[in-house]
Amino acid sequence: MPSLEISGEVQLAPEASPPKTVYVYVSSGDCLDANAPLLRRMPVTETGAFLAHIVAQPGTDLSLCAAGEFTPGGPSTLYGKYGKPIHVGPQREQEVREVKINLTIAAPRQFPIPVKK
């Protein structure tokens, strides 16, 4: 199965209060859809950088969102989505670099929380 390395940065809206934590969400399908399968959820660094490793089926379209978490597990009012889907090709190793996600203030939205195993 293909392995993807996705890296980039999340930028906070200038008028927004900094959240406790910012997470990047990688989903199969639309990451803004609460029912989309979550493949990866990870915090960004203090500078907004992230590096995610994902394993996915060839032909899958992935989407990336980022959201500020003000209370653990609560809905976010500060989030954004990468502008285009990431198509998983047949190559064993793939890289997607310089992904930029801008967080904006918006209506509250619940993002998935991974189930602990």
Image (cartoon, rainbow, N blue to C red):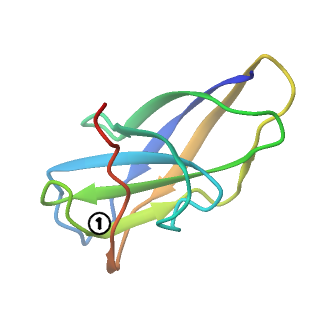
Q: Relative to 2, does residue 114 appear above or below in the rendering?
A: below
**Residue 50 x %, y %:** 43, 33
- Residue 70, image quadrant: bottom left
* Camera-side residue of 46 and 110: 110
The residue at the far front in this view is 117
Q: Relative to 107, does residue 94 appear above or below in the rendering?
A: above
91 relative position to 82: left or right: right
57 relative position to 106: left or right: right
- Residue 36, image quadrant: bottom right
- Which quadrant is home to the C terminus? top left
Looking at the picture, which amino acid does disc 1 mark? Pro
- Packing grade of label 1 (10 A; few <14, some 14-19, many >=20) is few
Q: Relative to 19, does residue 49 appear above or below in the rendering?
A: above
Name the residue at 31% across, 68% down: 78
Name the residue at 20% across, 57% down: 73
Residue marked by disc 1: 14
13 relative position to 69: left or right: right
Name the residue at 79% across, 16% down: 92
* Camera-side residue of 115 and 87: 115
49 relative position to 61: left or right: left
**Residue 111 x %, y %:** 37, 61
- Residue 97, image quadrant: top right
The residue at the far top in this view is 92
Name the residue at 74% across, 23% down: 2
The residue at the far bottom in this view is 107
